[in-house]
């Protein structure tokens, strides 16, 4: 397998090849070799990847378990040593006490010497016990740490069952997981991602083998759609003929001049109006009587009647108005010239016949839906 | 009301596809991404996306997996590696199966190059 590294793409592989051991070449060639068929090769790659990931995780767990077992053995040995030291210290203390009691009853120099030795032995036993206690505590701490490491390794193996052996492999695994999270299997490539509130529904392709409602049978797989027949090419449209030029409009004839209007006859003078008769003189008003002093109002004298107005003279008759002269007749309008005939439009060429559409292939019949299990009554 | 034309819609789709893929590469391969000029890489991405369509990888996940694998392995990985060529050219395999095979192949290659357990040994150990 030759794997040059182009400048734009292939950088990660180039970096990994630079630090690879020569022994890896043969394994790479086996990996890149084709299989009996594509499906078996894809299945082989799948099983190898799963096996490698499982072995990696199992190895991590085994290492952690070995460390935990070793720490527990050390802790047990330390606890046993502490117990032994404690027993020795207690025995030495008992001997020292007996020696001290004997020395008190027998005050000889030999007894005093024995008491001193017994006290020294008791002190040494106590020191040994203290050291054993400290060692046991340290061993217990190591055992607890080993247990924690084992739990961490098991948890990591369970959460990432595909533990990677290198940074490049881990990056490829992480990117593969991100591709599954951020790119939808249901969206055609090249379309904008549809925003969704939940952020999860569009990212997973619908798998008909997984029942939507637990307990119900899975839907049967839909039959593949038959291929659409190709549309026949449309015949080209014939070119439109050119439009004929429109003929120019003939000039309009001149309008004849209007004849002059005849003069209007003068109006006859109006007759003089007769003079109005003089108005009769008004009778004088009688003098008003003097007002009596606070003795009620005197009666008003009667107003004399007004003289009647003389009749108005009759108005003279109005002279008759002279007849208006007749209007001269309007000259006749000249006849309009006839419009030239518009040339006929050329006939449109006939449309070519449309090719017949190929018949659509029949849709395969959808498999029958499996019967729904009966819902238990409550 | 403003309307989006078909060309604008396709451009938005390409921009979104490129942006998400570049984000994944930057997140998982920060060292290599720091040395890259992504404006120059986008053109190669578009060529690879067209090749993915040719192999039947028409949904965006399998197409993105193809483009990402080409970024890992090199521009002509689909013809240089016989096993990959065999899988991609098979008409009976679905797009999701081809994409899964690409992911498995990439991981196994980097595991082998890192001196990890050989695939056969790992399989027997498991």
Image (tube, coloured by chain):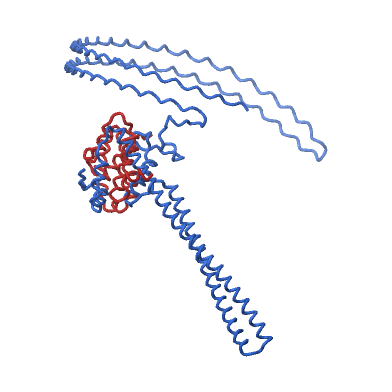
Pick the quarter of the image with the N terminus of chain A. top left
Q: Is residue A148 above or below residue B44?
A: below
Q: Is residue A242 above or below residue A90?
A: above
Pick the quarter of the image with the C terminus of chain A. top right
Q: Position of residue B102 (x, y in %)?
A: 31, 39
Q: Residue at x 41, y 26 (%)?
A: A221
Q: Position of residue A144 (x, y in %)?
A: 50, 60
Q: Position of residue A336 (x, y in %)?
A: 22, 11
Residue B8 visible within the image: no
Q: Residue at x 43, y 49 (%)?
A: A157
Left or right, A15 with reference to A292: left
Residue closest to the far right:
A295
Q: Is residue A236 above or below residue A289?
A: above
Locate residue A357: give its quadrant: top left
Left or right, A199 with reference to B82: right
Query: Chain B: what color?
Result: red
Labels in figure, total: 0
Locate residue A105: give its quadrant: bottom right
Left or right, A111 with reference to B45: right
Residue A193 visible within the image: yes
Chain in blue in the render: A
Front-lying residue, A159 or B67: A159
Q: Position of residue B85 (x, y in %)?
A: 24, 36
Front-lying residue, A151 or A100: A100
Front-lying residue, A26 or A202: A26
């Amino acid at each position: 397998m030759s794997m040059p590294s182009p400048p734009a793409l292939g950088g990660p592989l180039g970096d990994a090849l630079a630090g690879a051991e020569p022994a890896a070449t043969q394994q790479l060639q086996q990996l890149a070799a084709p299989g009996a068929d594509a499906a078996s090769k894809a299945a082989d790659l799948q099983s190898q990847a799963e096996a490698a990931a499982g072995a990696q995780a199992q190895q991590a767990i085994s290492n952690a378990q070995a460390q935990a077992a070793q720490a527990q053995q050390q802790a047990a040995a330390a606890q046993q040593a502490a117990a032994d030291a404690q027993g020795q210290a207690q025995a030495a203390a008992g001997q020292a006490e007996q020696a001290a009691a004997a020395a008190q009853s027998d005050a000889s120099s030999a007894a005093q010497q024995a008491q001193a030795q017994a006290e020294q032995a008791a002190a040494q036993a106590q020191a040994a016990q203290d050291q054993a206690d400290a060692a046991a505590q340290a061993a217990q701490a190591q055992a607890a740490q080993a247990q924690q490491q084992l739990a961490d390794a098991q948890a990591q193996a369970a959460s990432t069952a595909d533990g990677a052996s290198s940074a490049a492999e881990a990056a490829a695994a992480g990117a593969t997981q991100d591709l599954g999270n951020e790119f939808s299997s249901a969206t055609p490539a090249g379309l904008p991602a549809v925003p969704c509130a939940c952020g999860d529904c569009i990212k997973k392709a619908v798998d008909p083998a997984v029942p939507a409602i637990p307990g119900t049978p899975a839907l049967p797989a839909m039959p593949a759609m038959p291929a659409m027949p190709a549309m026949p090419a449309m015949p080209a449209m014939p070119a439109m003929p050119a439009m004929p030029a429109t003929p120019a409009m003939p000039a309009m004839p001149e309008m004849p001049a209007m004849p002059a209007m005849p003069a209007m006859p003068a109006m006859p003078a109006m007759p003089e109006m007769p003079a109005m008769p003089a108005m009769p003189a008004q009778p004088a008003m009688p003098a008003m009587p003097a007002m009596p002093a606070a003795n009620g109002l005197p009666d008003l004298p009667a107003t004399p009647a007004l003289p009647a107005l003389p009749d108005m003279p009759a108005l003279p008759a109005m002279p008759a108005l002279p007849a208006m002269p007749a209007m001269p007749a309007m000259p006749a309008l000249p006849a309009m010239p006839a419009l030239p005939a518009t040339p006929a439009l050329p006939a449109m060429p006939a449309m070519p016949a449309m090719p017949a559409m190929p018949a659509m292939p029949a849709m395969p019949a959808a498999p029958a839906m499996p019967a729904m299990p009966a819902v238990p009554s409550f | 009301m403003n309307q989006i034309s078909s060309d604008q819609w396709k451009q938005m789709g390409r921009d979104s596809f490129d942006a998400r893929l570049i984000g994944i590469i930057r997140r998982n391969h920060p060292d290599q991404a720091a040395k890259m000029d992504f404006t120059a890489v986008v053109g190669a991405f578009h060529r690879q996306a067209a090749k993915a369509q040719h192999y039947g990888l028409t949904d965006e996940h399998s197409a993105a997996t193809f483009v990402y694998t080409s970024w890992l392995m090199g521009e002509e990985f689909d013809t240089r590696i016989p096993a990959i060529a065999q899988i991609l050219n098979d008409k009976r395999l679905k797009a999701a199966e081809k994409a899964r095979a690409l992911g498995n192949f990439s991981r196994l290659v980097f595991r082998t190059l890192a001196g990890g357990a050989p695939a056969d040994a790992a399989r027997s150990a498991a």
